[in-house]
Image (cartoon, rainbow, N blue to C red):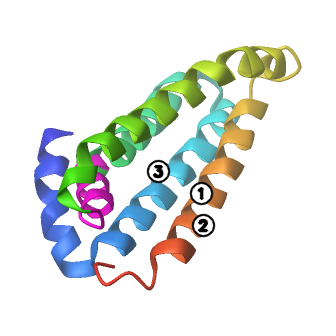
């Protein structure tokens, strides 16, 4: 992951920050959708699932510095610390708040949380692109 994090600024310069962020989210979401489908591979399901999980996690997390820089660069310098804190708070609160919901959904299907999450990630990617596509930094 460290290598990819170091490579992401190069990708950002080639494609622009917005396209890099949205592309990364999209590719990692495809890996997430593939994770529950790995069960069709029988005895190879666990290594295939693990590989999908590994790549999904690396791709999703490697873009974080680019995303943070892109978002904070749109704000005045004095607002950046508070904005960064609020972003972290919102992310952690959403993760903590959905644990119970995830458990309820898993009661019915172990695969369903992956697909629900994929819907949210795809929606977030589309909205993120739509909201920031006209930014001078995109």
Q: How many marks?
A: 3
Question: Quick check: is 106 in the magenta stretch?
Answer: no
Distance of label 1 from label 2 (alpha carbons): 5 Å
Residue 79 or 20: which is nearer the viewer? 79
Q: Which residues are magenta?
A: 64-75
The residue that label 2 is drawn on is: 127
Q: Position of residue 89 (x, y in %)?
A: 45, 30
Q: Residues within 10 Å of mark 3 (few under 14, many from 20)?
A: many
The residue that label 1 is drawn on is: 124
Q: Depth-wise, is mark 1 or mark 3 nearer the camera?
A: 1
Q: Is residue 73 left or right of residue 22?
A: left
Report the residue at 37% width, 72% height from top: 18
Q: Secondary structure at mark 1?
A: helix
Contact, mark 1 vs mark 2 (Cβ under 8 Å)? yes
- Whether residue 91 is visible, yes or no, is yes
Q: Depth-wise, is mark 3 or mark 2 nearer the camera?
A: 2
Distance of label 3 from label 2 (alpha carbons): 17 Å
Q: Secondary structure at mark 2?
A: helix
User: What mark, if any, has residue 28 been given in the picture?
Assistant: 3
Q: Earlier in the sequence, mark 1 or mark 3?
A: 3
Report the residue at 45% width, 28% height from top: 50
Q: Secondary structure at mark 3?
A: helix
Report the residue at 89% width, 20% height from top: 108
Q: Is residue 137 left or right of residue 43?
A: left
Q: Is residue 101 left or right of residue 36?
A: right
Q: Position of residue 11 (x, y in %)?
A: 21, 69
Q: Position of residue 133 (x, y in %)?
A: 46, 81
Of the 4 image quadrants, the one containing the C terminus is bottom left
Q: In this rendering, is residue 68 above or below 53?
A: below
């Amino acid at each position: 992951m460290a290598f990819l994090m170091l490579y992401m600024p190069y990708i950002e310069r080639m494609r622009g920050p917005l396209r890099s962020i949205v592309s990364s989210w999209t590719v990692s979401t495809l890996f997430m959708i593939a994770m529950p489908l790995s069960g069709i591979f029988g005895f190879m399901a666990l290594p295939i699932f693990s590989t999908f999980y590994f790549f999904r996690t690396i791709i999703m997390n490697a873009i974080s510095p680019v995303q943070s820089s892109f978002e904070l660069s749109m704000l005045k310098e004095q607002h950046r610390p508070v904005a960064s804190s609020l972003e972290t708070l919102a992310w952690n609160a959403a993760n903590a708040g959905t644990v119970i919901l995830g458990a309820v959904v898993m009661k019915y299907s172990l695969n369903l949380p992956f697909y629900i999450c994929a819907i949210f990630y795809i929606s977030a990617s589309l909205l993120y692109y739509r909201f920031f596509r006209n930014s001078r930094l995109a």
